[in-house]
Image (tube, helix red, strand yellow):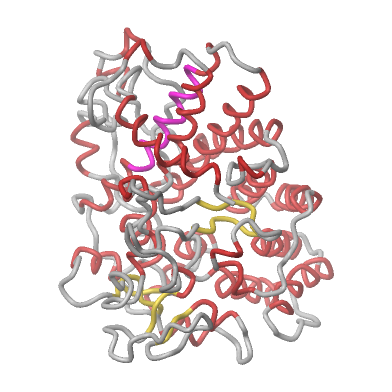
């Protein structure tokens, strides 16, 4: 299942250290820079097909990095929302309380870590896109590698634009003459619209090239379906409803479907099933724990039993599930319960609830830490159906919207919705999106913002959300300083 993973994980660390070439280690004042570790290999790299493969594998490896998928990701996307509180115990990682309460400022270090993690990924993709075209190698493989890089660049910019609004756009590594010129390296913020346009361009070009499927040895690489599905989400956030429908139709035409058992989506045995469109790959690498670095599950595992206990599902989220909704037990792990795999959750665990989608049974190896074999689900076909339902409802296509919505509801053991006004159906679809995707892919805060109700919902949960300010996060102050003032701060911070 994860044959690709060993090389992806092992080699990503080699390349992240090696890519001091071109721009990853250029001017120390460049705020798009990420400090590399080790000594660069300069002209010795990006010469062979093996180097091209190593470079794209490093892009995959970055998806598992601490700043990309652990504390920073969970703080910004989930702990800020009504789905989860900080969790763990008082005093442990107390800075996360600032995200729970929405009282963070531009100097809070987790914001800077998140920024660096996304731009490190962008730097790695730009290394591929700037250097791989000059390598003499199989044309089809080269085209695929470049398409993979464009997908990931778009993914990182989508994270950035939703978090900060307009951000600097860098599409290539700095040329030799630029490496000592801060004025060239320190790119000003582009507009939000310009960032979205670049994302759409990258995903569209990626979808034209990527294959629909891979052989077993390459399972886990991004596919045409991933590019089309991510593009549909990008269009959803821009309210381009017809494009959402058209793209969702293309994704469905590739053969994706709902699995019968919702819970199986989040078990190791359910990875890369017919519903899964894109996952972050994870695997314990025997004898190389440094390469088994993903900590998404460990951060959220039951404290004192599996992990650190952060991201505590709220009672409000529990109450959001309708009676008989099978997704509740698959989403929230309750203190004192016995899991279907036979683990008895500590009755005296510090928090009453934990994220069950991050739960990994105790019989799975923990040689390198808890949950290092658990893939993170980023996009499933159920979400594509809900995106299409939302778009159809906005265009007055009520019957089609109900059909897509009810496919998701009936899988969860709920009765179908027979009829509703457009406004009623809008609220139902938004609610369905919440419970279907809860604690999974980090969309809840951003969904509330795009729906125009973040202040209403989050203030009702006691969070200090300021309308007109907290829809975006502050640009990290450290980045403003490093840019020499080129970067400007978001209003209200």
- Residue at the image position 24 percent from the left and 38 percent from the top: 479
Percent from the top left, x then y, of residue 136?
57, 11
Using residue 225 as the reference point, say whether residue 71 is left or right of it: left
Tell which residue pokes out farthest to the right in this image.
399
Overall secondary structure of the magenta section: helix
Residues 338 and 70: in front is: 338
Taking the magenta stretch, the answer to whether it contains residue 218 is no
Q: Quadrant of residue 73?
A: bottom left
Residue under the point 48% across and 18% down:
130
Give the magenta part as a residue range. Answer: 117-131
Foreground residue, 207 or 395? Answer: 207
What residue appears at the point 36 percent right and 69 percent down from the top-left corner? 300
Specify whether residue 128 is painted magenta. yes
Q: Quadrant of residue 296?
A: bottom left
Residue 25, image x, y percentages? 27, 23
In the image: residue 459, left or right of residue 442: left
């Amino acid at each position: 299942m994860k044959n690709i993973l060993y090389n992806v994980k092992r080699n990503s660390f080699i390349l992240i250290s090696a890519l001091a070439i071109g721009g990853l280690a250029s001017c120390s004042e460049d705020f798009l820079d990420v400090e590399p570790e080790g000594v660069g290999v300069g002209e010795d790299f990006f010469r062979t097909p093996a180097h091209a493969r190593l470079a794209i594998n490093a892009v995959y490896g970055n998806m598992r990095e601490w700043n990309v998928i652990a504390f920073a990701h969970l703080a910004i996307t989930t702990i800020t929302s009504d789905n989860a509180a900080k969790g763990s115990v008082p005093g442990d990682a107390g800075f996360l309380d600032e995200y729970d309460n929405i009282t963070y400022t531009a100097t809070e270090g987790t914001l800077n870590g998140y920024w660096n993690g996304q731009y490190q990924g962008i730097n790695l993709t730009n290394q591929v896109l700037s250097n791989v075209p000059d390598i003499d190698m199989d044309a089809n493989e080269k085209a695929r590698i470049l398409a993979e890089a464009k997908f990931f660049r778009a993914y990182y910019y989508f994270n950035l634009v939703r978090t900060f609004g307009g951000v600097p756009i860098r599409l290539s590594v700095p040329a030799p003459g630029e490496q000592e010129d801060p004025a060239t390296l320190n790119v000003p913020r582009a507009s939000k619209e310009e960032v979205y346009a670049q994302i759409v361009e990258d995903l569209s070009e990626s979808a034209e090239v990527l294959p629909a499927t891979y052989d077993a040895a390459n399972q886990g690489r991004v596919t045409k379906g991933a590019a089309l599905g991510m593009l549909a989400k990008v269009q959803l956030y821009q309210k381009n409803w017809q494009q959402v429908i058209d793209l969702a139709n293309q994704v469905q035409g590739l053969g994706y479907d709902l699995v019968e058992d919702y819970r199986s989506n989040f078990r190791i045995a359910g990875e890369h099933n017919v519903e899964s469109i894109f996952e972050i790959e994870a695997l314990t690498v025997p004898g190389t724990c440094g390469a088994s670095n993903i900590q998404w599950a460990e951060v959220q595992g039951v404290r004192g039993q599996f992990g650190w206990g952060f991201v505590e599902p709220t009672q409000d989220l529990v109450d959001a599930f309708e009676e008989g909704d099978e997704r509740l037990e698959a989403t929230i792990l309750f203190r004192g319960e016995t899991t279907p795999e036979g683990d008895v959750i500590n009755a005296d665990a510090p928090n009453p609830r934990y994220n069950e989608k991050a739960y990994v049974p105790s019989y799975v190896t923990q040689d390198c830490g808890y949950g290092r074999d658990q893939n993170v689900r980023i996009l499933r076909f159920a979400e594509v159906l809900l995106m299409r339902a939302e778009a159809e409802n906005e265009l007055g296509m009520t019957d089609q919207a109900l059909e897509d919505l009810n496919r998701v509801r009936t899988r969860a053991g709920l009765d179908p919705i027979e009829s509703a006004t457009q406004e009623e159906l809008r609220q139902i679809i938004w609610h369905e999106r919440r419970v279907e995707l809860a604690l999974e892919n980090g969309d809840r805060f951003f969904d509330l913002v795009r729906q125009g109700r973040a202040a209403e919902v989050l203030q009702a949960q006691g969070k200090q959300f300021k309308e007109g300010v907290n829809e975006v996060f502050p640009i990290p102050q450290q980045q403003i300083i490093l840019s020499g003032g080129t970067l400007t701060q978001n209003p209200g911070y």
